[in-house]
């Protein structure tokens, strides 16, 4: 419970109609969740406009309405707060309502197209090993120490985010590592939070359905560094073309990591094999269990952040060398017939290219690479032909299939992917809408020693079709097929 006046402190109010000493029992932006005593936030979304649900919210007992446009008819028992941006007001008020939990621990955010889940997972594992109580918010799952809470988004909405942070504080957490998606930045999900640090991984093609242009996507990511306070650190990837731009206007102290330039945190790859990465970091030669050159960046970002948070560099490297990656990231199994199956969450052109390059580096010339890939429905369509082309360039066989078609026709998505296949590559591709059939076919095509990459879904345990999530787990299915083949 909180008094409206107290949670409005940081909000720029355009107009207030009604008393401001109302007792607010809870906050929501969904009229269907309103109960007596709730403050309802009317948000203009992609599918709907919350302003159309104000009367529903009032009917259900909302005592406060926060909106950008006041309704024509005002209910006498309700306080109306008109603001310029309801999403922003929601985030500022949610932080106050839950007692500003982000100020009570060290909150570090990771943004970038790829590597966020990997970095926050490594940071969580690292700080647990170093003896801290630690929270994590990621695409795969949220965590308070070892307690796992399901995640619905990469970055939760402002209300759930503050609830989770409050629970972490109650559990005695001193640190929280979270992913900050570009959607979250544009939608103000992290506004009003106090960050101790921010990490930039990289930026490549994704989400153009939402941000429209690459410039807008860059601008969205940069918002994160623009909001960091002076006391925080901002750690960027100096090898990424946009690494410097990210920190252009930040008040935070700026730091860089690189595999190519002489920066504060620097590494050199000595070896990159299926056993892991052998890196030289500040004069130390260390083996890591993570596979693929791109993971050298993730390791370096995590190392840099830990040092900037005051941890001992040697201790950090020792623990890091023992850690494994997040679920569904270069997750591999080998059949009795010596076929290697790799499950990886590569769902962007850059990630797919990186994973396939890694496979190319660790394969021997006799091994065929068979890639199975699809593209999500109701998501960026422009990446579809590009991903099919990359798969063809770096594999001997390609199976185009479905990956969460959502409300689109899966065959149509595959047709769009096929547009990217070069005429000479057509003979190496197959199109199989049913993903399970596709995995089965990949296994049937594979000979002893071959490598099958099952890309796009990683840790996901479902296939989303027309609003229904059906059980589906790439790794389990691959394991099943391998077992059947062994018989
Ligand atoms: C496109 C997008 O990001 N949408 C997010 C956004 O929804 P929205 O505001 O556009 O919702 P809307 O359906 O248009 O409705 C507008 C408003 O009317 C309200 N409403 C609606 C119906 C009703 O009966 N009553 C009512 O009050 C809704 O609650 C909402 O406040 O805000 C919601 C609350 O925070 C999110 O759940 C929702 O995520 C959707 C489900 C989603 O799929 N988002 C994905 C794309 C996403 O956010 N992905 C990123 C990761 C991307 C990455 O980097 O890989 C993430 O952080 O997870
Ligand atoms: N630093 C990196 N650079 C490029 N590709 C990477 C990097 N780290 C991971 N990848 C690739 O991207 C995939 C997704 O990695 P990860 O889940 O860590 O990224 P993410 O940023 O959390 O993605 P999402 O936007 O879906 O939350 C991995 O499976 C791997 O193929
Ligand atoms: N966070 C990403 C995940 C994509 C994963 C892929 N399997 C898909 O469904 O497109 C998104 O929501 O766009
Ligand atoms: Mg993620």
Image: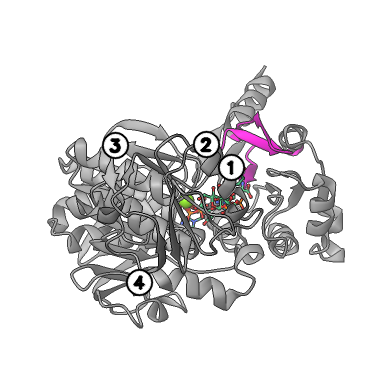
Reading the image, the residue beneath label 3 is 144
Q: CA distance from mark 3 to mark 4?
A: 25 Å
**Contact check, label 3 and label 1, Cβ < 8 Å:** no
Circle 2: element type: loop
Distance from disc 2 to disc 4, alpha carbons, whole Å, reads 40 Å
User: Is the Cβ of the residue at disc 2 closer than 8 Å to that at disc 3?
Assistant: no
The local crowd at label 1, few if under 14, some if 14 to 19, many if 20 or more residues have their Cα within 10 Å, is some
Q: Mark 2 or mark 4, which has the lower sequence index?
A: 2
Residue found 24% across the figure and 68% down from its top: 233
Return the residue at label 1: 56
Residue drawn 21% across the image and 57% down it: 306
> Whole-percent x and y of residue 203?
50, 69
Residue 476 seen in the figure: yes
Residue 41: which numbered mark, if any? none
In this view, the residue in front, 159 or 257, is 159
Which residue matches tag 4?
Answer: 225
The answer to whether marks 2 and 1 mark residues whose Cβ atoms lie closer than 8 Å is yes
Tell me which label, 3 or 4, sits earlier in the chain: 3
């Amino acid at each position: 419970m909180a008094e409206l006046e107290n949670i409005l402190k940081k909000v720029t109010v355009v107009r207030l109609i009604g008393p401001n000493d109302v007792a607010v029992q809870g906050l929501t932006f969904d009229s269907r969740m309103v109960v007596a005593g709730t403050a309802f936030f009317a948000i203009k979304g992609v599918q709907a406009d919350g302003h159309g649900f104000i009367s529903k919210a009032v009917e259900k007992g909302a005592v406060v309405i926060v909106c950008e446009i006041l309704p024509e008819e005002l209910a006498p028992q309700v306080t109306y707060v008109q603001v310029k941006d309801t999403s922003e007001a929601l985030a500022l008020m949610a932080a106050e309502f839950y007692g500003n939990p982000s100020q009570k621990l060290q909150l570090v955010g990771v943004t970038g197209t790829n590597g966020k889940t990997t970095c926050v997972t490594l940071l969580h594992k690292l700080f647990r090993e170093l003896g801290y109580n630690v929270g994590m918010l990621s695409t795969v799952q949220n965590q308070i120490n070892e307690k796992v809470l399901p995640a619905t988004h990469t970055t939760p909405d402002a209300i759930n985010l503050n609830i989770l942070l409050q629970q972490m504080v109650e559990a005695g957490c001193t640190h929280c590592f979270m992913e900050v998606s570009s959607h979250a930045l544009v939608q103000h999900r992290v506004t009003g939070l106090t960050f101790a640090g921010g990490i930039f991984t990289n930026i490549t093609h994704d989400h153009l359905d939402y941000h429209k242009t690459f410039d807008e996507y860059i601008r969205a990511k940069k918002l994160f560094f623009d909001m960091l306070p002076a006391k925080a650190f901002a750690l960027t990837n100096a090898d990424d073309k946009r690494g410097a731009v990210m920190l252009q206007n930040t008040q935070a102290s700026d730091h860089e990591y690189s595999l190519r330039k002489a920066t504060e945190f620097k590494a050199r790859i000595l070896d990159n094999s299926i056993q892991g990465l052998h890196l030289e970091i500040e004069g130390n030669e260390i083996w890591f269990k993570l596979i693929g050159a791109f993971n050298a960046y993730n390791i370096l970002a995590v190392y840099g952040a830990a040092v900037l948070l005051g941890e001992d560099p040697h201790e950090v490297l020792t623990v890091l060398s023992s850690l494994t990656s997040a679920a569904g990231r270069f997750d591999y199994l080998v059949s009795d017939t010596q076929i290697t199956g790799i499950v990886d969450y590569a769902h962007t052109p850059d990630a797919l290219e990186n994973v396939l390059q890694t496979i190319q580096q660790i394969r021997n010339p006799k091994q065929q690479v068979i890639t199975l890939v699809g593209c999500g429905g109701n998501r960026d369509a422009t990446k579809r032909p590009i991903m099919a082309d990359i798969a063809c360039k770096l594999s001997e066989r390609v199976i185009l299939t479905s990956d969460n078609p959502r409300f689109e026709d899966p065959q149509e998505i595959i047709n769009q992917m096929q547009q990217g296949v070069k005429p000479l590559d057509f003979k190496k591709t197959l199109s199989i809408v049913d993903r399970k059939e596709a995995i089965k076919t990949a296994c049937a095509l594979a000979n002893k020693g071959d490598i099958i990459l099952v890309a796009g879904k990683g840790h996901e345990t479902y296939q989303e079709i027309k609003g229904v999530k059906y059980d589906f787990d790439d790794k389990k299915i691959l394991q099943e097929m391998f077992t059947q083949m062994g018989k």
